[in-house]
Image: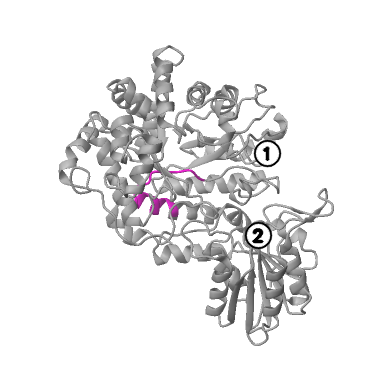
Amino acid sequence: MPDTSTGSDTGTGSTRRSTARPSRRAVLAATAGVTAALTVPTAAGAADGDRRLRALISRMTLEEKVGQLFVTRVYGHSATAPDQADIDTNLKELGVRTATELIAKYRVGGIIYFAWAHNTRDPRQIADLSDGIQHASLDQPRGLPVLIATDQEHGAVCRIGRPATLLPGAMAIGAGRSRSDARTLGRISGAELRAMGVHQDYAPDADVNVNPANPVIGVRSFGADPDAVAALVAAEVRGYQSAGVAATAKHFPGHGDTSVDSHYGFPVITHSRELWERLDAVPFRAAIRAGVDSVMTGHIQFPALDGSGDPATLSRPVLTGILREELGYDGVVITDSLGMQGVRTKYGDDRVPVLALKAGVDQLLNPPSLDVAWNAVLTAVRNGELTEERLDESILRILRLKARRGVLDHPWARPDRIGRTVGTKAHLAAADRIAERTTTLLVNEGGTLPFDPRREQRVLVVGADPASPSGTTGPPTGVLAAALTDLGFTATALSTGTAPSAATVDKAVTAAGNADAVVVATYNVTAGSSQRTLVDRLLATGRPVAVVAVRNPYDIAQLPAVRACLATYCWTDVELRAAARVLVGRVAPRGRLPVPVRRADDPARELYPIGHGLTY
């Protein structure tokens, strides 16, 4: 749960101080009319905007140009006065004490927020941090606004938690099949991010998840049908960008069929070029048609697209040949994090940023050592491996994005809108309504569901309690029990974990003896998982048992004896509360599987196809 205390950044004066405005006025004077010119649908208007942006670039030093290409982490809740532990980490990893010092030293064009970097305590603090960062940059000679970004995918990946609105994740939205809901998600999330001074979101995920064993994408994808994924990707892009936040389609050329996590290894996609065109490329084409501001690369090897063995992030045939030339994309291309193993396997950290730029990348995200990466790019220009004109091309794209989203004109957070925008009743109610349209009833033999308080008053909630996604209440068993209690039942939570021991299973079975019904939360059930033993033992008690698969809908394939099963696609509060309302019939289940569930004993055969879903 986020700290609710209010942080502040003092900089060389209080946040949003009037004495900082001359720096802002200098920027506005240099860029006057750029945003308007870039929104005029004429070649003349665009050319006029580019001339003004090129004028900004022409005044930059080489070092400033190099800095504009980087988006980096920095630790702390404040741009000028972080906690001592964050100062120590900044010194160790970045060689500076604060965000202000980071910007002065490297003139970075972007900052990425993480919960683990202690950037996201609460909305007011985030807004103050954002403004502190902008002051630090605009107070520099020729200072430009910083593009502040984060990963707010919703569902399993969120960096900013409560009291911000947390919405269902991508696979849940895929189960709801509503373009309107996808666009609403982007609009709500974008409005809240912009109020806190965040301009770029690394969402939506445009990967088509066709591999049930995918360890890194999975429920972060809208599903396995490329056309359905494409429609929802485009809708979410439009939602975010209507709220003034740059959307990011990821992970090009497609990370949906991997069994290796690119954070820790180097995945290889074995699709043919023809299959890539029919499957992986479809959502990215849709995102480009929707005007997506940025595309993130994947640290994956794709031999059918480039036989060199290089990751796509470093592949000129993939990024320039396919993304730019074939798909016609001229927006910002950003790498996935350069600290991930998938991009570090073949080359050293000093070569990766240079090779990425040569491949066609514009923004270099979160290198493990900013100093090594920054100096490597600087050296590559000085020794002629990269030209300054090549840097100018990328900086122009980045400045176009900043202008198009109003960052050059108004980079500031909107603290006056936080109370009227972030986590409002209207936004929270919308999240609940969307979640209700996503919950999927996979099995309901003998009318096991819905539970009735006249028959099943006492409900035991057991099962897996994985660490909750950022900023949600958790644990899942507790959230489900609390929601059922609010709905008129007497519910008790008993956490049994993802690998319950024999003693834990015995304890749950004993507790079931005092209940009228049992709800079991499952999480990534495998053939050898003791979660299967837990479910079988509870079924043997004769009590009505309902399984809630709180992450992957594939769990049901490992639980053939189950007579009632819901899929929520994530274990955030909003999805679990919706599942509780479905369990008791307060709302009817409406979700449909966005991925096929294959038989455990014969993976070549489908147990439940895409589109399967029951109702009451």
For the record, the magenta segment spans 189-203
Q: Amino acid at mark 1?
A: Leu
Residue 268 at x, y = what percent? Answer: 68, 33
Whether residue 390 sits left or right of residue 475 in the image: it is left
The residue sitting at 54% across, 44% down in the picture is: 234
Residue 522 at x, y = what percent? Answer: 67, 63
Say above or below: 81 vs 104.
Answer: below
Q: Is residue 199 magenta?
A: yes
The residue sitting at 72% across, 73% down in the picture is: 506
Q: Is residue 395 visible?
A: yes
The residue sitting at 42% across, 15% down in the picture is: 387
> Where does label 2 land, which residue?
523
Which sits earlier in the primary sequence, circle 1 or circle 2?
Answer: 1
Circle on res. 502: none
Residue 68 at x, y = what percent? Answer: 36, 29
Say above or below: 242 vs 168.
Answer: above
Spatial separation of the CA atoms under disc 1 and disc 2: 28 Å
Observer-nearest of 593 and 466: 466
Q: Amino acid at mark 2?
A: Tyr
| Helix, strand or loop at mark 1 | loop
**For residue 548, what is the image quadrant?**
bottom right
Residue 129 at x, y = what percent? Answer: 31, 48
Which-is-in-front pick, marks 1 and 2?
A: 2
| Helix, strand or loop at mark 2 | loop
Say above or below: 481 vs 338.
Answer: below
**For residue 281, what is the image quadrant?**
top right
Q: Is residue 529 magenta?
A: no
- Of the 4 image quadrants, the one containing the C terminus is bottom right
> Where does label 1 land, which residue?
279
